[in-house]
Image: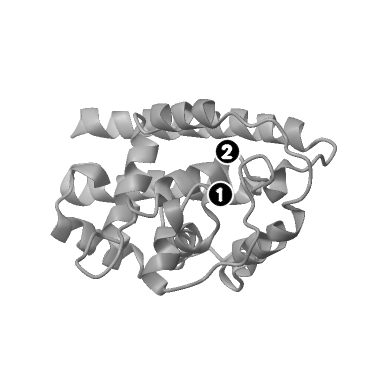
């Protein structure tokens, strides 16, 4: 499937399930019950350094720009940057036990998005102005794949805003404060998040997931660079 506009695309079952429920919120609520369990070693500095390095890549710069356009700064509430939506998504991809199908769809969507804007504006998404970005979103939302991808990004924004800060988003409870929401207690700290429990091969699976994720990033970065050279 080379773009959002493939007539044979059908919403996959995993995405239907994701879009039909607030699974992270359920996980976050359940995570409160495990807060009394022994802590597992966690290196926040190393995690943040890896994220800052990722932001130098076109793929993650694009995802950051997508969030900023979907949830921009305003006088009445926080922005995507304020709730750390991109860092939350990075955690979802690299730390949480997220399905490979979902990770693939995130990265492929970035490739399709930049392919579309290269054809229409001769530029990657991050180089567009606000009006061009809006035109792009309205255009790709006319396709089932494009609508699914945007809906998934919006759902990730909601999750970043409403989940406990330990999951990467909602720093200092900014999202909760905006909504005047009182979170349940105790909240899970880093080291006691649901995916950090000793579950056999989870650590091995996460390492394999990181390697596959890096391969996909390299693939789409190469495609974007080719587009830039062509432009």
**Residue 229 % position (x, y):** 22, 27
Numbered disc in front, either 2 or 1: 1
Mark 1: few/some/many CA within 10 Å (<14, 14-19, 20+)? many
Task: Determine the residue positioned at 30% across, 29% down.
Answer: 226
The answer for how far apart the CA atoms under marks 2 and 1 are is: 12 Å
**Position above or below: 64 against 73:** above
**Residue 108 % position (x, y):** 47, 46
Mark 2: few/some/many CA within 10 Å (<14, 14-19, 20+)? many
The colour scheme used here is: one colour
**In the figure, is residue 94 to the left or right of 83?**
right
Question: Does the image show residue 54?
Answer: yes
Question: Residue 150 versus residue 144: which sits nearer the camera?
Answer: 150
**In the figure, is residue 200 to the left or right of 160?**
right
Question: Does the image show residue 143?
Answer: no
**Residue 156 % position (x, y):** 48, 59
For the C terminus, the quadrant is top left
Q: Mark 2 vs mark 1: which is more N-terminal?
A: 2
In the picture, the disc for residue 16 is none
Task: Determine the residue positioned at 66% across, 66% down.
Answer: 26
Q: Secondary structure at mark 2?
A: helix
Question: Residue 219 versus residue 168: which sits nearer the camera?
Answer: 168
Question: Residue 157 versus residue 44: which sits nearer the camera?
Answer: 44
**Which quarter of the picture shows residue 111?**
top left
Residue at image mark 1: 167
**Which quarter of the picture shows residue 230?**
top left
Question: Residue 97 versus residue 189: which sits nearer the camera?
Answer: 189
Residue at image mark 2: 94
Tell whether label 1 touches label 2 (CB within 8 Å). no
């Amino acid at each position: 499937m080379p773009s959002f506009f493939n007539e044979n695309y059908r919403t996959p079952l995993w995405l239907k399930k994701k879009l039909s429920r607030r699974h992270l919120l359920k996980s976050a609520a359940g995570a409160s019950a495990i807060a009394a369990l022994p802590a597992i070693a966690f290196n926040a500095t190393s995690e943040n350094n890896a994220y800052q390095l990722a932001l130098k890549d076109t793929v993650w710069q694009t995802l950051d720009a997508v969030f900023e356009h979907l949830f921009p700064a305003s006088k009445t509430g926080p922005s995507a940057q304020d709730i750390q939506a991109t860092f939350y998504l990075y955690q979802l991809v690299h730390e949480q036990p997220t399905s490979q199908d979902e990770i693939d769809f995130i990265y492929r969507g970035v490739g399709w998005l930049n392919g579309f804007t290269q054809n229409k504006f001769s530029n990657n998404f991050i180089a567009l102005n606000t009006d061009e970005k809006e035109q792009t979103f309205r255009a790709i939302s006319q396709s089932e794949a494009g609508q699914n991808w945007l809906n998934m990004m919006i759902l990730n924004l909601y999750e970043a805003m409403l989940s406990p800060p330990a999951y990467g988003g909602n720093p200092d409870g900014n999202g909760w404060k905006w909504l005047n929401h009182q979170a349940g207690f105790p909240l899970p700290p880093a080291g006691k998040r649901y995916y950090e429990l000793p579950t056999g091969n989870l650590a091995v699976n996460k390492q394999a997931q990181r390697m596959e994720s890096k391969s996909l990033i390299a693939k789409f970065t190469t495609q974007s660079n080719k587009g830039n050279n062509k432009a």
